[in-house]
Image: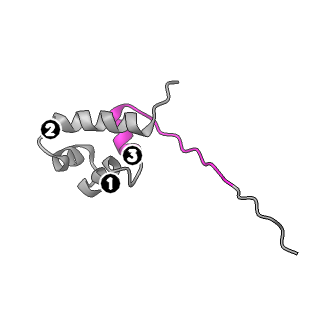
């Protein structure tokens, strides 16, 4: 299994975008909204199953929990 960062996936999407007339046409081709694809490219959302499918990728969600230590009050 080869792991990719979000930036690497975005570069692949940008390469696909370079081969079409517009972001709208690529979104239409992939069956997603242009607004959604734009959000993905601006890192406001993560690419979902439809986008990843067209890139030949599979996404896995990993949740990270963080905890903050506080001093106990008396």
Depth-wise, is mark 3 or mark 1 nearer the camera? 1
Relative horizontal placement of residue 65, taking residue 9 as reference (left or right): right
For the magenta stretch, what is the residue range?
49-66
The residue identified by callout 2 is: 20
Labels 2 and 1: the sequence-earlier one: 2
Residue at figure coordinates x 37%, y 31% from the top left: 56
Q: CA distance from mark 2 to mark 3?
A: 19 Å
Within the magenta stretch, is there residue 57?
A: yes
| Position of 31 relative to 7 (above/below) | below
> What residue is pinned by disc 1?
39
Q: Disc 2 or 3, which lies upstream in sequence?
A: 2
Left or right of 18: which side holds 65?
A: right
Q: Residue at x 32, y 35 (%)?
A: 11
Image location of residue 67, percent across then percent down: 70, 56
Identify the disc placed on residue 47: 3
Q: Residue at x 47, y 39 (%)?
A: 59
**Gap between marks 3 and 1 measured at Cα:** 9 Å
Kindly report which numbered mark, 2 or 1, lies closer to the viewer in this rendering. 1
């Amino acid at each position: 299994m080869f792991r990719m960062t979000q930036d690497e996936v975005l570069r692949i999407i940008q390469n696909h975008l370079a081969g079409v007339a517009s972001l709208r046409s690529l979104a239409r081709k992939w069956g997603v909204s242009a607004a959604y694809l734009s959000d993905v490219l601006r890192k406001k959302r993560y690419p979902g199953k439809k986008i990843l499918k067209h890139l030949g990728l599979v996404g896995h969600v990993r949740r990270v929990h963080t905890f903050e230590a506080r001093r106990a009050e008396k």
